[in-house]
Every structure is written in C-alpha cells, then in structure tokens.
Image (tube, coloured by chain):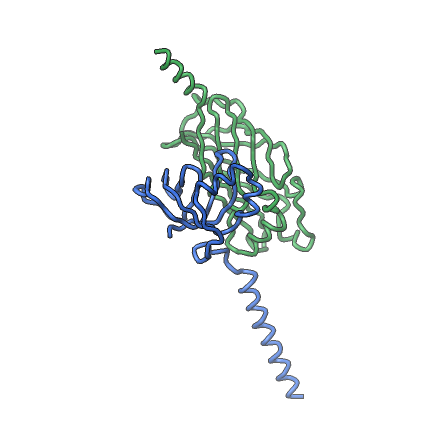
Chain colours: A green, B blue
C-alpha cells in the first residue's frame, strides 16, 4: 500500500510529455526574390504538465533546404553551426493547467529564453495548446530578427533576406 | 568585319552556356543526398553515444555533418524514427516497419548533433543498408 502511494506520488510529480520529432519551419523570403524556406523535423521538446515548464532543442544541421547552396550559407555564414550546433528554448506556458486543456485550441503565453547562434534573448509569444487523439499539441508562430542573435547579413544580399524571419513551430507531445 | 561579328556571337553564346551551366551546377544544385554518399565513419551506436556523452564538443568536431554508418539493436520504432541501443535517434524519410524492433541493424545517416534534452545523438536522412 505504502509502495503504491509512493509510486503514484512519483507519477504525479513527474508528468512529463515529450517529442523528438517536433517541427520547426522558417521563412526568410523577400517578395520578388528567391524563396528561402527551411524545415527541421527532428526538434525535441519536453513539457512538465504540473508546472507548464517547457523546453525545446533544435539541431541546426537538422534544418533542410531545397537548394544546397542555401543550406551551406545558412550553416557556414549565418548560423555557424559548427560552433553553435543547436538552438534552444527554455521557459514556461503562463497559467498552464492540464485540466483546462480540451480539443479546442486555447491561447497561452509562452515566455522564456531563446538561444540561437550562442546568443540568448527573452521572448514572449502566443502558443496554441490543445488535446489531440494521441497527445497534446503546442504550436504557433513568431518573428525573430537575425540582428538580435548577432547574425550578420552582408549588405550585398541583405535585400534578398528578410529583416524578420518567420518561425513556425508544431509539437505533438506524448507520454 | 563579318568575321568579327561571328566571333562576337560565338563568344556571347559560349558565355551564355557557361553562365547557365554555373547557374544549374552551383546555384540551384540540390541538397546533399546522403543515400549516395559513402560513410566517413563506421561505428557502433553504443560507442557513438558514449563519445557524445563524454564530450559532445569533441564528438561534434569528429562526427557533425558527416555521413556515418552505425550498428546496434533497434530499441524503438515510431513512424519514421528508429532508436538504436536506446541512445541514437535515426530519422528516415519513410515510415518504418514495427517488426524491426529487437533486430540487429546497420544503417547510414547524417549526424546532426547531440540532443541534451534526451542525451541522444541524432542522425537524419537515414537508410538501412
């Protein structure tokens, strides 16, 4: 009986749900110029359901482009992924309560530290949270500026790369 | 005079062809195809994960962005993802058969780095040898 109580206590204390195959897409295109889009299908994320604590990690080499040259420039010139192999987020879904989550998407404020290219910046974005048949979905989109993460875009190509990069994320978290 | 014109036309044509060639060959060249690349390293999944756990920066300098071949036992299969020896995450381009679980396997993929959240090494664009 005691063991059972102890065990249930452990379960109640660690209500982590996670994914290793989260999705992040970004777009940095400027109208009339070449399309710049990329997708990473192997982003990891963990949510502690009892507190709303949320962490995500994307490996930069996991971002794929259609054109090789773009992928090379992204890795070598902008993200310097040999030196900074990952981007991370660590924060909290404000006011998260698992009992209030339904299949209807509900907006939460996701606050925390975003680290890209070795630079950390506090961000606060809106995230949609809802239950799906096999887990919990967290998704949304926000903009980032390369300059905030000390990513320099040479003036020669700055016309072709947007000042604001559109980021779209989608995580299906399961037990 | 006529000769000069012909030379000029030929020159322009050559330049155009060259330009087009460079454009296709270099600027819009498709991304790496890991399937057709030879592995730079052949290593057991256990050894790879051990090296990453010990020192991920050092391991990155050796394996990051390289095409590597790993061997081990399949411990989990979900959709297009396979875990090998509970420590190496392998993303495939297609859905995998669940009956691969517990089988010994040799596979090839691109090392994209170390995931500290799960303490796992990640490979993408994997194919089974």
- Looking at the rendered image, the quarter that the N terminus of chain B falls into is bottom right
Question: Is residue B124 or residue A153 the one in the foreground?
Answer: B124
Task: Tell which residue pokes out farthest to the right in this image.
Answer: A155
Q: Which residue lies furthest to the top in this view?
A: A2
Q: Position of residue B91 (x, y in %)?
A: 43, 45
Residue A80 vs residue B81: left or right?
right
* Quadrant of the rendered image containing residue B100: top left
Question: Residue A67: where, in percent of width, then height?
Answer: 53, 56
Nearest to the observer: residue A51 or residue A162: A51
Residue at (44, 35) in percent of width and height: A19
Report x, y in % for residue B48.
48, 43
Above or below, B24 relative to B58: below
Q: Quadrant of residue A174?
A: top left
Residue B113 location in percent, x, y? Answer: 52, 43
**Horizontal relation, residue B115 to residue A10: left or right:** right
Give the residue displayed 38% in from the left and 13% down from the top.
Answer: A5
The residue sitting at 60% across, 42% down in the picture is: A84
In the rendered image, the residue lying farthest to the left is B99
Label tally: 0
């Amino acid at each position: 009986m005691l063991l059972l109580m102890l065990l249930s206590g452990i379960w109640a204390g660690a209500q982590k749900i996670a994914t290793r195959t989260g999705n992040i897409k970004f777009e940095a295109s400027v109208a009339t110029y070449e399309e710049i889009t990329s997708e990473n299908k192997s982003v990891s994320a963990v949510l502690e359901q009892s507190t709303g604590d949320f962490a995500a990690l994307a490996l930069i080499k996991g971002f794929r482009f259609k054109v090789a040259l773009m992928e090379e420039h992204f890795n070598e010139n902008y993200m310097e992924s040999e030196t900074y192999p990952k981007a991370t987020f660590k924060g909290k879904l404000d006011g998260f309560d698992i009992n209030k989550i339904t299949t209807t998407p509900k907006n939460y404020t996701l606050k925390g530290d975003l680290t890209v290219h070795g630079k950390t910046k506090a961000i606060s974005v809106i995230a949609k949270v809802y239950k799906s048949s096999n887990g919990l979905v967290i998704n949304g989109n926000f903009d980032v500026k390369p300059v905030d993460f000390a990513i320099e875009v040479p003036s020669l190509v700055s016309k072709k790369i947007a000042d604001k990069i559109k980021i779209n994320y989608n995580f299906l978290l399961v037990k | 005079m006529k000769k000069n014109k012909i030379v000029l036309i030929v020159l322009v044509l050559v330049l155009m062809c060259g330009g087009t060639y460079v454009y296709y060959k270099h600027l819009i060249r498709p991304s790496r195809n890991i399937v057709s690349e030879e592995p730079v390293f052949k290593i057991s999944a256990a050894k790879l994960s051990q090296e990453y756990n010990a020192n991920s920066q050092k391991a990155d300098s050796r394996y990051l962005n390289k095409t590597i071949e790993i061997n081990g036992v399949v411990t989990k299969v979900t959709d297009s993802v396979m875990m090998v020896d509970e420590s190496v995450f392998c993303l495939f381009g297609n859905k995998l058969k669940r009956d691969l679980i517990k089988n010994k396997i040799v596979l090839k993929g691109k090392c994209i780095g170390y995931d500290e959240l799960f303490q796992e090494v990640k490979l993408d664009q994997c194919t089974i040898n």
